[in-house]
Image (cartoon, grey):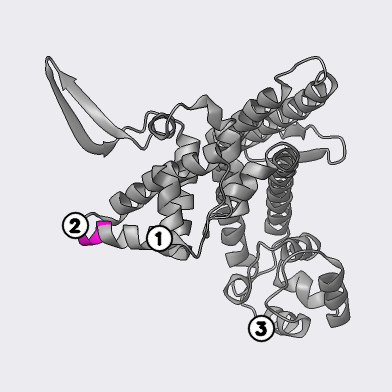
Amino acid sequence: MKKMTVLIPGPSWVAKSSISKMNVEGALSCILQVLFSSIYYLVLNAFAKLDEEGAKAGNADDQVAVLIGIFLRILQHCAVNHIELKLKTEIKNVLQVLFPELSKHTNVFTKTMLRLLLKAPGCFPIMKMKTQQIARFFDKTRGNKIQISPRELKSLAKNSIGIKDDSLETVLILKIKRLIFIIEQIDDIKEHLKIYVKENLQQNFDIITSINGIGKTTAEKFLIEIADIENFKSHKQLRAYIGTDPSIKQSGSSVNVNGRISKRGNAYLRKTIRQMAVGVIRCCPYFADYFHKKISEGKKYKQAVIAVANKLIKTLYAMLKNKTFSQVKNEANLINIIYS
């Protein structure tokens, strides 16, 4: 069967891969990689253009916010996360043949371990490496610390039941290269997101992260998606935009409010606010008490989390409108912020 060559665009990392066995999943994965790369460069070019025309366009900041928000949703809707998870599963499956013991003793998806597997893809190549060579490799590679020592890794490779298969080793290398490629691009766009938030939304960022349990990543996503709090006349409007408001069914003259959320708003933002709600339940006594109150009233876990999310939306709206920071030690003050 003829080989299909796929070229993935990129200035500093032009990747080239050959597919000897043509199948639907492999072709789709490659097409999505090309699509992802193309979108990635379109976004970066748009960033540059907006920077150049920023003086002419008074609403350039809003355009950048919308642009980043669109790209974040593209990351989701183009199934990039799915590709990443799929690649990780495939890498684990290949390692089950080449070095099955490795994933049981360490995280094989740290940057250090991935780089090592590129050089020595399996128990036999690792067994041939000297202990000092592995140690130097661990020391010079940035990333999370490996949970296994070079000596233990050598011993594990020596006693492994894995097999020697040149074809599978090549497959493993190609899959790891593809995984690193996707991770680097995602990290790059996230870095642009952080820079934009720092330069344009730092005060709002400091305000919402003053609530215990709201992390930097979710705060950045939330601020990018809402763009400007002044776009919303009330917290109910913001809630409807997110899609956590109750669904309403109307038949003739009768109106019935369903207990389920409408899900008519921004799905990406809805996922973000749920993550934020889980965080404040764990770390903020005020929201934790409200969560347990809903559970005691007979609400299911997901329903209680949504209730906390809606209370959090109301809180964030008031804080951003009033430019007020959370007073963690004074829960009464937080209540005043919500209802003022």
Name the element at disc 1. Answer: helix
Q: Nearer the viewer, residue 163 or 308?
A: 308
Instruction: Report the number of discs.
Output: 3
User: Label 3 to label 1, Cα distance in Å?
Assistant: 53 Å
Of circles 1 and 2, which is in front? 1
Magenta region includes residue 84: no
Looking at marks 3 and 2 on the same chain, the residue that comes earlier in the sequence is marked by 3
Q: What residue is drawn where x is 76% and y is 34%? A: 8
Please indicate whether residue 69 sits to the left or right of residue 244 in the image.
Answer: right
Question: In the drawing, what numbered circle is on residue 298?
Answer: 2
Q: Is any part of residue 73 visible from this angle?
A: no
Q: Which residue is located at x 66 percent, y 83 percent?
A: 159
Highlighted magenta segment, given as a residue range: 294-298
Up-down relation of residue 334 to residue 66 (above or below)? below
How far apart marks 1 and 2 lie (CA) works out to 19 Å
Q: How crowded is mark 2: few (under 14 residues within 10 Å), some or many (20 or more)?
A: few
For residue 179, above or below residue 158: above
Image quadrant occupied by the C terminus? top left
Mark 1 or 2, nearer chain start:
1
- Classed neighbour count for the residue bearing mark 1: other residues with Cα under 10 Å, few (<14), some (14–19), many (≥20): some
Mark 3 or 1: in front is 1
Which disc number belongs to residue 184? none
Q: Which amino acid does label 2 sit on?
A: Gly
What mark, if any, has residue 286 been given in the picture?
Answer: 1
- Which is more N-terminal, label 1 or label 3? 3
Residue 222, position as x, y percentages in the image: 55, 41
* Among the 4 quarters of the image, the one containing residue 156: bottom right
Q: What residue type is labelled 3?
A: Asn
- The residue under label 3 is 159
